[in-house]
Image (cartoon, rainbow, N blue to C red):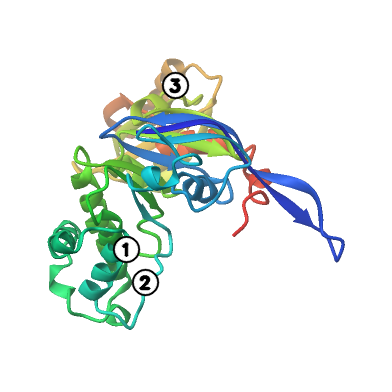
Amino acid sequence: MIEVSHLSKSYGVFQGGRGARGAQKAVDDLSFHVDRGEIVGFLGPNGAGKSTTLRILAGFLGASAGRVRIAGHDIAEEPQRARAQIGYMPELSPLYPEMRSGEYLMFRAELKLIPRAKRRAAVAKALSQARIEDVERVMIGHLSKGYRQRVGLADALLGSPPLLILDEPTAGLDPNQIREVRELIRGLGGEHTVFLSTHILPEVEATCERALVIAGGRLVAEGSIEALRARSRAPSARIVARGERAAIVAIATSVAGVNSASAEPATTGGVALTVDFAADGDGAAITEALVAALVGAGVGVREVASHGASLEQVFTELTDTRADAASAREPA
């Protein structure tokens, strides 16, 4: 559905009144593909080149080099055919606050060249998919941010495009609104291919089957969520113990080879201790020493299990060496 080959985008650097001097690359030789029906997360720190890449994919920004094909159509050579396959939701949807939700979507359906006889049905379907039928006659300016985000999603869904490109779809929403939008996105899989850009890692874990990670405009990793977790250099473990939380954390961090430890109440009672080990450490040996230290201090150990790396841990390992350089690359 999406084929990106050696994509680059550079911006001129302006200094004083002398105009452009040199160039900064927001996207640097980026290549990847997304198959039909997938829900794929596009991850990277702020300034990594995510929004620039999405604008190029959606046809709103030209590339400096490389090729993008959408459903077999080159975005540069066949822009109308390529864009007809796309529903694009930017981070800040350009809504008109003085229009009613349904009125705005009818206007957008006309701009998207949906035939007049099919517009009402297309708007009704988009309202239903975004679960905003109840605000069809409400002025957009009177809606909460969560509902405005849904209007933007309904706009992207108009005409049932096979590909949805969503840029930070839950930015600024409260936890309840975030959960609702995630459910909507999960429900779109299969019928639509979804390419979701975000720097909120739980978003990807909750909605996506696969993820791409970029830093400094370059692809640094891709694969299923589990495959990305497996890339972590640092082993870890989860231990359920009985005792005082602060004391358990103190014991854990005193063991050689333990990088960090955190604890929270376990659902089955006691304390759930999560421990990250040194990258070059022997996880089994450190776990054995850790359990011995806890038991020796009179802490009852109920459960010990290897604990897969979190996506946050992997993300940090993949991007932290490039984040500072990336932050200056992508214009706001």
Q: Earlier in the sequence, mark 3 or mark 2?
A: 2
Disc number placed over residue 289 in the picture, else none? 3
- Estimate how packed mark 1 is, as few (under 14), some (14 to 19) or many (20 or more) residues with alpha carbons within 10 Å: many
The reply to whether the C-beta atoms of the residues labelled 2 and 1 are less than 8 Å apart is yes
Which mark is nearer the camera, 3 or 1? 1
Tell me if 275 is positioned left or right of 141 in this view: right
Toward the viewer: 297 or 4? 4
Q: Where is residue 107 shown, x and y percent of the image?
A: 28, 70
Q: Residue at x 43, y 59 (%)?
A: 91
Q: Residue at x 16, y 62 (%)?
A: 131
Residue receiving disc 2: 95
Q: Where is residue 252 shown, x and y percent of the image?
A: 45, 34
Q: Amino acid at mark 2?
A: Leu
Toward the viewer: 330 or 301? 330
Q: Where is residue 291 shown, x and y percent of the image?
A: 38, 25
Disc number placed over residue 152 in the picture, else none? 1
Judging from the image, what secondary structure is the residue with disc 3 in?
helix
- Estimate how packed mark 3 is, as few (under 14), some (14 to 19) or many (20 or more) residues with alpha carbons within 10 Å: some
Q: Amino acid at mark 3?
A: Ala
Q: Image height check: is 318 above or below 284?
A: below
Q: Earlier in the sequence, mark 3 or mark 1?
A: 1
Toward the viewer: 316 or 239? 316
